[in-house]
Amino acid sequence: MILDTIEQAARYAALHPLFERAFHYLRVTDLAALELGRHELDGDRLYVLLARDEGRTRLGAKLEAHRRYIDIQYLIAGDEEMGWRSTAECSKIDTPYNDGRDFLLFADPPVSWLAVPPRSLTIFWPGDAHAPLAGSGPVHKAVVKVAV
């Protein structure tokens, strides 16, 4: 798991062949002006999901994990908090893995919480269970899905 600002994203470009393209898109695109939903950059290998949601607070946020994608979550506006726990330490499945959605939920609580201010990004690998939207209030974000 990584938490940093978009200005420092180049530090992580070597970690995956598609990261530089993802970071460039986040830096140069007027994300606030784009329609909500999916925006393809390279088919199913690299795409962006734009969403506006309400925070669920720590009590309402559940740990999720993916097997086929890395999440780069970029906060456009709002104040977000996210929970984290290694999937190796998760033992209570809330929603079984759905291969079509590459998604499962755990009932385990996060072991740490991260404050994520605007223009910050988090990177979650398949081994990182993460609980997004743990803050309160409106959140506008981009989630870049990077195929493993």
Image: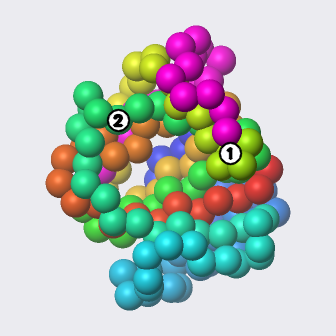
User: Which residue corresponds to the image point at 19% horizontal and 47% vertical from the top-left?
Assistant: 136
From the top left corner, tell me how far across and down residue 68 is, in percent: 76, 46
Q: Are marks 1 and 2 in contact (CB under 8 Å)?
A: no
**Of callouts 1 and 2, which one flags the residue occurring earlier in the amino acid sequence?**
2
Q: Secondary structure at mark 2?
A: loop
Give above or below for 91 relative to 123: above
From the top left corner, tell me how far across and down residue 118 is, in percent: 32, 63
Q: Residues within 10 Å of mark 2 (few under 14, many from 20)?
A: many
The question of residue 86 being in magenta is answered with yes
Give above or below for 80 relative to 140: above
Image quadrant in which you'd find residue 65: top right
From the top left corner, tell me how far across and down residue 43 is, in percent: 77, 73
Given residues 30 and 98, the one toward you in this image is 98
User: Which residue corresponds to the image point at 31% horizontal and 59% vertical from the top-left?
Assistant: 53
Q: Which residues are magenta?
A: 79-98
Q: Amino acid at mark 2?
A: Ala
Given residues 110 and 63, the one toward you in this image is 63
Q: Which residue carries the number 2 mark?
A: 61
The question of residue 71 being in magenta is answered with no
- Whether residue 142 is visible here, answered yes or no, is yes
Say which mark, if any, is on residue 56.
none
- The single residue placed furthest to the left in the displayed view is 137
Quarter holding the N terminus is top right
User: Which residue corresponds to the image point at 35% horizontal and 35% vertical from the top-left?
Assistant: 61
Q: Which residue carries the number 1 mark?
A: 102
Q: Secondary structure at mark 1?
A: loop
